[in-house]
Image (cartoon, rainbow, N blue to C red):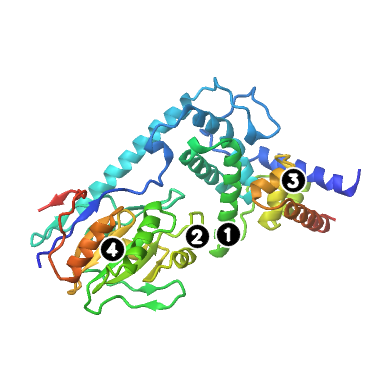
Amino acid sequence: VERHEVVYERKVHEGRAPATSNRAPPEFERLYLECYRPSVRLAHLLTGSNAIAEEIAQEAFVRVHQRYDSLQVPAAYLRTVVVNLSRSHLRRVQRERRVVLHRTAVELPPEIDETWQSVVALPFDQRAVLVLRYYLDLTEAEVASVLNCRIGTVKSRHHRALTKLRQELS
Amino acid sequence: MTANDDLEQRLRSAFQVVADRTEIARNAPRARQNVSSDDPLLLVLDNDAPARATRRREVVRVAAAALLGAAVTAAAFLASPWTPDRTRVVHAPPILANPAGNVSVNPEIATAVSPRPVISGTDFAGNPLAGADDGQPHVLVVVAHWCPPCQSAVSRLVRLHAQQAFDGITLYGVVSATSPEGDNYPPADWLERQRWPFSTFDDADNRIASALGATALPFYVFVDANGQVVVRLAGDVTDAQLTMLFKALAAGQPLPIAVEGWVPATTVP
């Protein structure tokens, strides 16, 4: 048998950064310009980690870019992706048993820090409800839509989170 | 003010302070000062917003990616041992990327030549999987659960298996580049849903994929009865092309076979 070692390259997977594949539409550039920093802040609040927040925001924009043409409200989709990526990140670090949650590196006043550390200690779903309700001022229906759950679930998570915080902070 | 109101106010203050103090890279895009909205992620976009900074960053990113690709290709070429007794291929840069954009480069890939590297590993249940060293021709298929071409390859192989296209050949799956953020995670459940009938290595850390020289996904490695790698190929391959290769491998015929539509990568005779 005559032996060969040949690699056929027919199609390289397309899951790369969007900017290298083709030119981004102007609307996407505007979205990036306006929403990048808010996305980093949201990811910071959701993960408790300033360090990972930028990575999440960048990845969220990659995802938005990949299906930009089919999105009705790109900013809303972006917000949902940031929430989902934050959840995935925390699941991964918990599974790898590296750290349960990064403590924030930013300097905070004592009372704020106490509240923030209690929030960071909450399970992700409860923390996400609080962040979406009190930072983004979303309604319960909007929170349910972002978290892909029922309004009743949002209410119960909200109630549990506040109960736990009240115990922690009293 | 009720206790609830007080707590909600504390939460609002805490979130605002933490958000305000979030450290963001200095060169990150900055919104125009006159844009305001209660929901920063639902801003009404200003049609006149300047996008020059974004364009400059894009140019820098493309240039950096091109430089990285050129450097990796040069390194792979220089690291390849020259073996004049067989056809050698300088293949594409040994890069695997996952959906998060993390890229791992393994210099060992460039030196992967026949015979097939000894591989060992476990299935998803953690049971050791035999390394297919029983003298039977076999095919290893490297896939990732999040990669659309791999998803179609899995459906295709399941269908071909039902059509008994694998007579005389054993097929092994290698599930690599596992990412919880990707579609179809966890991969064991995905393969079960697809009724995947083949023994499969859990290669979440890309160890086996790297040893086999996978440069793109899905990646097929055809191994003959003597344990020699006779063909490696990447990408989306049709039913007819795969069936033809499987039959030739089972019959011990020389490979590769010229198949319409395939263009080999750079080949050094």
User: What is the chain letter for disc 4?
Assistant: B
Residue placed under numbered mark 4 in the picture: B212
**Residue appearing at x 49%, y 43% in the figure:** A63
Q: Secondary structure at mark 3?
A: helix
Locate residue B233 relative to residue A68 in the image: left or right: left
**Residue appearing at x 62%, y 51% in the figure:** A47
Locate residue A156 relative to residue B231 in the image: left or right: right
How far apart marks 1 and 3 lie (CA) works out to 24 Å
How far apart marks 1 and 4 lie (CA) works out to 30 Å
Residues under numbered marks 4 and 2 in contact, where contact means CB atoms less than 8 Å apart = no
Work out whether B104 lies above or below A20.
below
Q: Which mark is residue A140?
A: 3
How far apart marks 4 and 3 lie (CA) works out to 51 Å
Q: Which mark is residue B185?
A: 2
Q: Secondary structure at mark 4?
A: helix
Locate residue B208 relative to residue A30 in the image: left or right: left
Earlier in the chain: of badge 1 and badge 3, it is: 1
Locate residue B149 relative to residue B135 in the image: left or right: right
Q: Quadrant of the C terminus of chain A?
A: bottom right
How far apart marks 4 and 2 lie (CA) works out to 23 Å
Pinpoint residue A15: horizontal percent, then vertical percent: 41, 47
**Residue appearing at x 28%, y 45% in the figure:** B71
Residue placed under numbered mark 1 in the picture: A91
Work out whether A67 lies above or below B214.
above
How far apart marks 2 and 1 lie (CA) works out to 12 Å
Looking at the rendered structure, the kind of residue marked 1 is Arg
Dot 2, crowdedness within 10 Å: few (<14), some or many (≥20)? some
